[in-house]
């Protein structure tokens, strides 16, 4: 079978799975997820054996230690995957929720109800745990999922999907609800992106290159964020002890994430009292600092920041530092360089904080809190499929509700259009 026919057949199978899920009760979905969690743990040796093939291939290919670490499955990570499934099972089911209801003058009641999107394609790299995470979220929200993981994890993903599909079938859910494009051919992704009318939404999870390639080639709506160029602005009215802790956490706690701070903006009124101690703390943690001219006057020995650096998502212990005149200049900088992901202000001035919230156009805007908190779990949404910087259909952390859409429902008693 050629690639086009293979992918199309898989997508049609997922469509059948979506119809099956539309009839599934919350209890049926929850019980299936709990059984999937147990099955992953029960089959851990099989999963680790399959993963070993991917690890061997990755080493022969010369992939980095970081990439191999992301690829690796062990008992602990399988247990974490299973726990994630159980946590999703425990979340409220958004499907069928009536979010609004109002009555018209003619006595007709009109409402909006949450319903599944349908078939969601997930295109991702490296981490095999995404296979289980994406499946659990899509299934709980009533969506069939078409999974296309990276070629470096194909054996691991096959094994995980085999376990999940077996449990789905035993739970009375069509196996097509969990569909895997198990070919390493890149052409398979291009064919998947053409299947408008069969696949309803594409979510790419990976680097900027992957997301741009998917967006440029897809005929299907794509939910995306290209990169996380995040800022923290330390205002002249900030609690400087709090500001230091927030900035340190935003950069150092986990620098490789999309919500880590890449540029720290500091009000010139407090720069001389704030920067020496703050930069010393960063240097002690191994952060490479790049500063504007004013920053370098206050803290000599810092590398000069270049214009292009302000657009970079480092995903590493590298930080741009810029001294700005005031809140307006800080927001101008953010408007120019931010990727609209996560931006924060540290201030005790309520009016400034509210201006920042209103005027900074990002998926999450924070006052006196680290950008690292822009996360589905931290926001109380439970698990998330990713963080969207789009404005349609979802923005910010995408939990279960964001994996549904709404339809209008009408209750009448014989009303006619006059």
Image (cartoon, rainbow, N blue to C red):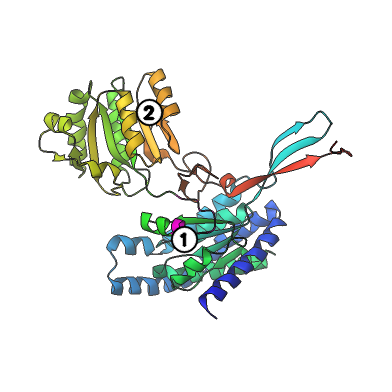
Q: Quadrant of residue 208?
A: bottom left
The residue under label 1 is 217
| Residue at the extreme left | 301
> In the image, residue 92 lies at what x, y percent?
62, 45
The answer to whether mark 1 and mark 2 are in CB contact below 8 A is no
Secondary structure at numbered mark 1: helix
What residue range appears in magenta? 214-224
Point out the image quarter for the N terminus. bottom right
- Near-viewer residue (135 or 405): 405
| Residue at the extreme front | 418
Residue 15 seen in the figure: yes
> In the image, residue 400 lies at what x, y percent?
57, 47
Location of residue 93 with respect to 35 vertically, above or below: above
Residue at left offset 23%, top offset 20%: 269
- Near-viewer residue (413 or 250): 413
| Main SS, magenta residues | loop
Would residue 249 be found to the left or right of residue 406 on screen?
left
Q: Quadrant of residue 156?
A: bottom left
Q: Determine crowd level at label 2: few under 14, some 14-19, many 20+ residues with C-alpha closer than 10 A.
A: some
> In the image, residue 143 lies at what x, y percent?
62, 56
Would residue 23 be found to the left or right of residue 334 on screen?
right
Location of residue 118 with respect to 271 vertically, above or below: below
Secondary structure at numbered mark 2: loop
Residue at left offset 70%, top offset 40%: 112
The residue under label 2 is 368
């Amino acid at each position: 079978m050629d690639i086009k026919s293979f992918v199309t057949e898989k997508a049609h199978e997922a469509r059948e799975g979506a119809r099956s899920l539309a009839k599934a009760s919350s209890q049926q979905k929850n019980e299936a997820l709990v059984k999937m969690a147990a099955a992953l743990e029960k089959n851990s040796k099989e999963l680790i054996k399959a993963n070993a093939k991917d690890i061997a291939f990755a080493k022969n290919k010369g992939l980095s230690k970081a990439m191999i670490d992301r690829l690796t499955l062990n008992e602990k990570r399988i247990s974490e995957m299973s726990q994630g499934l159980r946590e999703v099972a425990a979340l409220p089911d958004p499907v069928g929720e009536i979010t609004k209801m109002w009555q018209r003058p003619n006595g007709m009641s009109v409402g909006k109800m949450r319903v599944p999107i349908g078939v969601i394609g997930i295109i991702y790299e490296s981490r095999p745990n995404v296979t289980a995470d994406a499946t659990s979220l899509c299934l709980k929200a009533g969506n069939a999922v078409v999974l296309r993981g990276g070629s470096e994890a194909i054996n691991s993903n096959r094994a995980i999907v085999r376990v999940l599909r077996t449990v789905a079938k035993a739970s009375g859910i069509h196996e097509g609800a969990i569909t895997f494009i198990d070919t390493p051919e890149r052409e398979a992704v291009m064919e998947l992106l053409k299947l408008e009318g069969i696949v309803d939404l594409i979510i790419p999870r990976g680097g900027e290159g992957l997301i741009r390639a998917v967006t440029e080639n897809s005929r299907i709506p794509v939910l995306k964020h290209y990169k996380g160029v995040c800022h923290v602005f330390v205002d002249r009215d900030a609690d400087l002890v709090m500001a230091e802790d927030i900035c340190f956490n935003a950069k150092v706690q986990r620098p490789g994430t999309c919500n880590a701070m890449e540029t720290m903006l500091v009000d010139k009124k407090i720069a001389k009292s704030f920067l020496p101690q703050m930069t010393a703390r960063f240097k002690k943690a191994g952060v490479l600092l790049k500063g504007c001219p004013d920053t370098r006057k206050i803290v000599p020995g810092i590398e000069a920041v270049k214009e292009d650096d302000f657009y970079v998502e480092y995903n590493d212990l590298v930080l741009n530092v810029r001294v700005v005149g005031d809140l307006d200049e800080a927001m101008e900088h953010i408007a120019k360089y931010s990727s609209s992901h996560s931006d924060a202000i540290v201030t005790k001035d309520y009016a400034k904080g509210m201006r920042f919230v209103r005027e900074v156009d990002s998926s999450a805007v924070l006052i006196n809190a680290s950008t690292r908190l822009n996360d589905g779990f931290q926001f109380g949404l439970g698990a998330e499929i990713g963080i969207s910087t789009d404005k349609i259909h979802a923005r910010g952390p995408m939990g279960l509700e964001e994996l549904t859409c709404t339809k209008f429902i009408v209750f009448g008693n014989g009303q006619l259009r006059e």
